Image (cartoon, grey):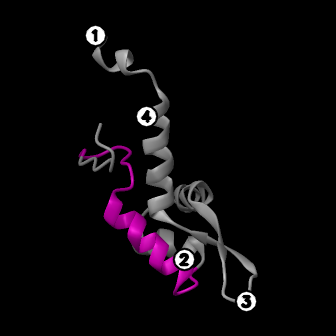
Amino acid sequence: MSLFNDNTKTGGYKHLNYTERTQIERWYNIDKKKPKEIAGLLNKSTRTIKREIKKGLVKNLNSDLTEKLVYSVNFKYYNILIYFLKKPCYNYFIK
């Protein structure tokens, strides 16, 4: 499985790919769309979008020193990378 999770299965359940996650980031943070609207645009379940937003929420410090919760696709991938770097290397070579 790749870091960006670009799954192209036909039928059944699919993962969100990087492009879809960046669209969620833009629609949620800039356009202020609700998860239900985003789910309709991406043809995904509302619950899927809510989970994705929950996983990628970060506190953003504004210029007036107030904190705001925003969705960041890059923060989610940073956490995945840290998780894999903390695992012992010998786990990757066991078959």
Q: Secondary structure at mark 3?
A: loop
Mark 1 — residue?
95
Magenta residues?
Answer: 9-33
Mark 1 vs mark 3, CA separation in Å: 53 Å
The residue tagged with tag 2: helix, strand or loop? Answer: helix
Which residue is labeled 3 in the image? 64
Neighbour tally class for label 2: few under 14, some 14-19, many 20 plus, Cα within 10 Å: some
Label 4 sits on residue: 84
* In magenta stretch: residue 16: yes
Res 8 label: none
Residue 12's place in the image compared with 44, above or below, is: above
Upstream in sequence: badge 2 or badge 4? 2
Q: CA distance from mark 2 to mark 4?
A: 28 Å
| Location of mark 2 (residue) | 28
CB contact under 8 Å: marks 2 and 1: no
Q: Is residue 61 above or below residue 45?
A: below
Disc on the earlier residue, 4 or 1: 4
Name the amino acid, label 4: Phe
Q: Residues within 10 Å of mark 1 (few under 14, many from 20)?
A: few
